[in-house]
Amino acid sequence: MAPKRILVDGYNLSLEKGTGIATYARNLTYALKELDYDVDVLYGHALPPVALPQAREMTFFDPASFEENRWLRRLGQARAVFSLPGARTARPVPYTGMVVDAGFKARMPRFDRLLNADNLYTIANMVNAYTGRMWPVRVEGEQPAVAHWTFPTPIRIPGAKNIYTIHDLIPMRLPYTTLDKNQRFVRMVTRIAQSADHIVTVSETSKRDIVNLLGVPEERVTNTWQAVDLPARFLNKPMDAVTSELKGIFGLDTKRYYLFFGAIEPKKNLGRLIEAYLGSGIEDPLVVIGAEAWKAEQELRLLFDDHIRTLVQDGAETRVKRKVMRFGYAPFPLLVSLIRGAKAVVAPSLYEGFGLPALEAMLCGTPVITTSHGASPEIVGDAAMLVDPYRVDEIRDAMLALEASAEKRADYAERGRKRAQEFSEERYRKNLAEMYARL
């Protein structure tokens, strides 16, 4: 029997700055291909209505060349709106190899067909905000048996089983930590809870939230967990090469710094981490890797607030800037080296629906300090140090405990490696296969 065809959305995959959901979507396509499914990936670029397939393939890899023309973009959006209430059509995008795509390989999914429905996600969200509708999309050619939407999106494929991954309900649990339009989010996930053929999530904590807060029957929610995996060429890079990279690029000595990586926003709790670190008296620097997001200035106020500086001794500005090293971005191979070279990774988020960065650090053999709230305790088990993210003293004391004991660091490094193995690709594929079989 021919393999079933499954469609996966490509919205987060198309973002220039990758997100955790982009990683999830990419890993999902890899798992589906290993399970011998045919995979469609549906994008929503604003591609021009051109006849030549070469032009469509070119524009797919450089959508900004069309989207920068605001009049063409508005024309495309207006055309989409006036086509309501009819369904949008997703058409195949040529993928002949004409475009040199070596620079895209790291963030490309695995697929049998690339599809695109012009302006799909922009218009679908606009329509849903005003009407509450789930927008139908037709697929040109062979139809998928399942449409797996990797985040709450107001779109469905008529005739397919539509399943939606809800990673967490943080906009409901911690609405003050997110820029999401929270009321729209609640309306959307409530509609999904009512209409989805099935809901997928990534932890027992998130499953419990979906059942309790959205009223979804437990049998309609499956926790597949996530898999943690890093390319062997980065994970097994010789340590002397890692040491040379860190010294040459950042001036860092291996195992002589603490690391935070992630978006700088309230949920990640960087402000309390900086306060705990500076109050600990630890001499090794704290390295912060991440782009500034919502309320970043609030999280970084101990580094840049002139009023606070007047309250401490002369030279505090130089001392603080020397001890806290902040970089907006590190390419993925270099980020893996930074994780491997750290004395510990500190991730005291206010809440996590899963907590993939902690598992990635554990897979690298780096000790982890993480949050005791949300899903993190069930994910890391006893293989990481858990702290109350609202208690600066607990974060500080955990860092001091690791600083004082090489034996404790080695113990957590070993336990972390073993725990990370439990979230293998094989286990993830097995969970997915069982869920699709039930559908």
Image: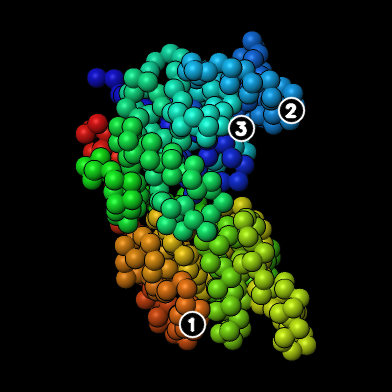
Q: Residue at x 41, y 64 (%)?
A: 362
Q: Where in the figure is residue 274, as x and y percent of width and height? A: 59, 74
Q: Residue at x 58, y 70 (%)?
A: 271
Work out whether residue 346 or residue 240 is closer to the camera in this orientation and state it.
346
Earlier-in-chain disc, 1 versus 2? 2
- Between label 2 and label 3, give the one nearer the viewer: 2
State the residue lying farthest toward the top. Answer: 51
Relative placement, left or right, of 369 versus 277 is left
Q: Quadrant of the C terminus?
A: top left
Q: CA distance from mark 2 to mark 3?
A: 26 Å
Report whether residue 179 is seen: yes
Q: Which residue is mark 3?
A: 101
Earlier-in-chain disc, 1 versus 3? 3
Q: Residue at x 72, y 86 (%)?
A: 311
Quarter-wise, where is residue 156 in the image?
Answer: top left
Q: Which residue is mark 1?
A: 393
Q: CA distance from mark 1 to mark 2?
A: 51 Å
Q: Which residue is mark 2?
A: 70
User: Is label 1 in a helix, a strand or a loop?
Assistant: helix
In the rendered image, the vertical position of residue 407 relative to residue 230, given as above or below: below
Relative placement, left or right, of 398 versus 63 is left
* Pointer 2 local density, CA inside 10 Å: few below 14, some 14–19, many at least 20: few
- Between label 1 and label 3, give the one nearer the viewer: 1
Q: Residue at x 28, y 48 (%)?
A: 211
Circle 1/circle 2 CB separation < 8 Å: no
State the residue lying farthest toward the right. Answer: 314
Q: Amino acid at mark 2?
A: Arg
Which mark, by number, is residue 253? none
Report whether residue 29 is seen: no
User: Is label 2 in a helix, a strand or a loop?
Assistant: helix
Relative placement, left or right, of 327 versus 226 is right
